Image (tube, rainbow, N blue to C red):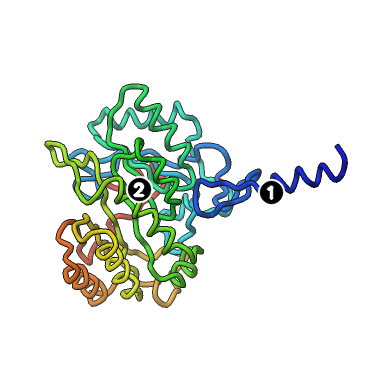
């Protein structure tokens, strides 16, 4: 191979990009998420702390992916989501992952939730297809930070039963400062429109009240960011539907990384959450869930434990 041909080949490789998530990283390396080519599943566990129709009466089997395509400075899953340092210990065999999921389904869980899968969509789909090949029929839940390409979401129409996106920002500066993703507002908006196109505003429940299909939009109210929360709710009401099921969360809890931050270093104030609740009511949202202000600390995971969440 001549030097010129070698350079052209190298240039072509660098021009190729990963199209799974909006980062569009060059292929041939680990990219922004640094997750590599494996499954990078950090934990598979039973969780009873989701919204009532998501957990259902027996809990949901959550599959937590390591690394993340959003590096939120306040992330409560920081033990596994950070893109720096060694990859957390993980399950990286399809057989072992599905075996573990089946063990939890055998205990009565009716759903499998894939948490932070945006950078591992092909691996998520392989897990789903292997479960179905083995005869399992849980509701498949995509629990995402909503930094997803709309085209990727469109391709999941036959795979995902329930979308559980967390709409974080309508403020691009806040998205840049807190999550390194200034284009988050427009990216998340397009992804949500596609989720809504697929599922609409209705939740399909079974006879025990567990969700089998639909869309629930979460929003975590951040300290010092009331206007961002209001803007998120306005987008959902005005561009999607005020009939959506909304989960408005007050559970923000500062992690060690933001302990000294002027806003993120504290929990939410009553007047902040109250102002967002007022906006939710003004916009006509009547379907969904809110949290008590004493919720911080109640939902914190510990990925050093097999159970992850304390019962």
Please give the name of the residue rendered at 31% of the width and 38% of the height, measured from the top-left corner.
140
Between tags 1 and 2, which lies in front? 1
Q: Is residue 284 above or below residue 139?
A: below
Quote the CA–CA distance across marks 1 and 2: 31 Å
Question: Horizontally, is 206 left or right of 46 in the view?
Answer: left
Question: Horizontally, is 55 left or right of 23 in the view?
Answer: left
Please give the name of the residue rendered at 31% of the width and 22% of the height, measured from the top-left corner.
135
Q: Find residue 37 and report its horizontal and vertical position in percent.
A: 57, 38
Please give the name of the residue rendered at 22% of the width and 56% of the height, measured from the top-left corner.
244
Q: Find residue 272 and report its horizontal and vertical position in percent.
A: 26, 75
Q: Is residue 189 visible?
A: yes
Closer to the chain start, of discs 1 and 2, is 1
Q: Nearer the viewer, residue 102 or 209?
A: 209
Q: Which residue is mark 1?
A: 14
Residue 143, label in figure: 2
Number of other residues with Cα within 10 Å of mark 1, as a class: few under 14, some 14 to 19, many 20 or more: some
Q: Find residue 53 and report its horizontal and vertical position in percent.
A: 20, 45
Q: Are marks 1 and 2 in contact (CB under 8 Å)?
A: no
Q: Find residue 205 and report its horizontal and vertical position in percent.
A: 17, 41
The total number of labels drawn is: 2
Please give the name of the residue rendered at 82% of the width and 42% of the height, measured from the top-left corner.
5
Farthest-out residue, left:
207
The quarter of the image holding the N terminus is top right
Q: Specify the quadrant of the image occupied by residue 112.
A: top left
């Amino acid at each position: 191979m001549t030097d010129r041909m070698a350079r052209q080949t190298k240039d072509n490789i660098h021009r190729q990009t990963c199209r799974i998530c909006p980062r569009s990283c060059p292929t041939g390396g680990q990219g922004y998420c640094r997750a590599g080519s494996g499954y990078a599943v950090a934990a598979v566990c039973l969780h009873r702390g989701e919204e009532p129709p998501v957990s259902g009466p027996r809990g949901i089997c959550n599959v937590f992916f390591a690394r993340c395509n959003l590096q939120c400075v306040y992330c409560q899953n920081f033990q596994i989501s950070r893109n720096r340092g060694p990859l957390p210990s993980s399950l990286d065999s399809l057989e072992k992952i599905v075996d573990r999921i089946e063990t939890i389904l055998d205990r009565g869980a009716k759903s499998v939730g894939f948490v932070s899968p945006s950078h591992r969509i092909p691996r998520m789909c392989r897990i789903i297809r292997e479960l179905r090949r083995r005869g399992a029929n849980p509701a498949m839940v995509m629990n995402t930070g909503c930094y997803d390409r709309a085209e990727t979401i469109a391709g999941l129409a036959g795979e995902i039963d329930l979308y559980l996106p967390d709409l974080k920002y309508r403020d691009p500066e806040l998205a840049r400062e807190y999550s390194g993703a200034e284009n988050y507002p427009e990216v998340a908006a397009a992804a949500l429109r596609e989720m809504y196109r697929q599922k609409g505003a209705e939740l399909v429940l079974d006879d025990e009240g567990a969700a089998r299909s639909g869309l629930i939009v979460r929003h975590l109210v951040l300290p010092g960011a009331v206007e961002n929360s209001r803007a998120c709710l306005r987008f959902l009401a005005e561009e999607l539907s005020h009939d959506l099921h909304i989960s408005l969360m007050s559970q923000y809890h500062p992690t060690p990384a933001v302990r000294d931050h002027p806003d993120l270093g504290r929990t939410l104030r009553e007047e902040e959450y109250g102002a967002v609740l007022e906006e939710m009511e003004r916009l006509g949202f009547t379907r969904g869930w809110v949290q008590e202000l004493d919720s911080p600390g109640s939902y914190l995971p510990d990925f050093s434990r097999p159970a992850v969440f304390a019962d």
